[in-house]
Amino acid sequence: MSVGAFNRHGVWAIYKFEMHRFLRTIATGLATPVITTSLYFVVFGSAIGSRMSQIGGVPYGSFIVPGLMMLSLFNESIFNASFGIHMPRFTGTIYEPLSAPLSAFEIVLGYVGAAMTKAIAVALVILATANLFVPVTILHPGWMLAFLLLVAATFCLFGFIVGIWAKGFEQLQIIPMLIVTPLTFLGGAFYSIHMLPEPWRTITLFNPVVYLISGFRWTFYGQGDVSPGVSLAATLGFLIICLAVIAWIFRTGYRLKS
């Protein structure tokens, strides 16, 4: 391989190894979101939906579908990416890809690409399951796929950072459970922030998850709590921050070489 050439074989080896671990438990991995989504529709769709039939002209059951997909996408992206890079650190095999003729970009591409594939697969399973309960309309399918890929890439990169930062498996759960999931529930996943009284409506705008969910919901129903342009800019901003942190990690060797 010439200097500077893209090592597709090395990237594919990392990707294939990570996907093999997912495929070993694919039945459980895909059955869980189906059961969880069904329970959400039983609880939120039936209990709350019977009292709040529509939001912005969209049936409540349909309204929560983008929020459910984002909730799962956030958690799956962070978990898959963080676990994928943390395991080699835990077992000591991280030195193999670090010593291989692979650039930092190629290593990240292999791990993050596999994590993205898993997370997007689960999100699409949730979308298919939701269609069994409520009618789902996607007004902007191209933008929907773009947002799905962009958010998955962003949170997989974030998960990659978490996996390197975590000193143990317990710390892998801290960010998703104590930060991301609460922010998602408070970020308009199951309601519109316009339903909130002041000053809570303004305070909610400081929640970055609001912009991701709002932009994704706009691709379905052409409406959101903030403009799609702002949502896209916020997502790209988060992506750039994650890329900058990962670049710093590989430049300094933070918790990779120690």
Image: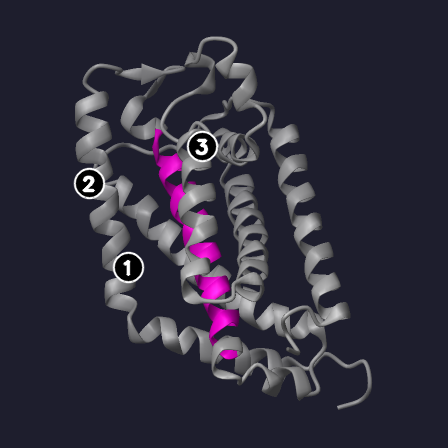
Residue lying furthest right = 3
Secondary structure of the residue carrying tag 3 is helix
Label 3 sits on residue: 220
Of labels 2 and 1, earlier in sequence is 1
Q: In the rendered structure, does residue 74 fall within the stretch colored magenta?
A: yes
Q: Position of residue 95 (x, y in %)?
A: 61, 85
Of labels 2 and 3, earlier in sequence is 2
Does the image show residue 36?
yes
Display coloring: one colour
Q: Amino acid at mark 1?
A: Leu
Q: Identify the disc placed on residue 30.
A: 1
- The quadrant of the rendering that contains the N terminus is bottom right
Along the line of sight, which residue is nearer the eye, 236 or 176?
176
Q: Position of residue 54 (x, y in %)?
A: 31, 16
Nearer mark to the viewer, of 2 and 3: 2
For disc 1, the neighbor class at 10 Å (few under 14, some 14 to 19, many from 20) is: some
Q: Amino acid at mark 2?
A: Leu
Secondary structure of the residue carrying tag 1 is helix
The residue positioned 56% from the left and 31% from the top of the image is 211
Q: Which residues are magenta?
A: 64-88
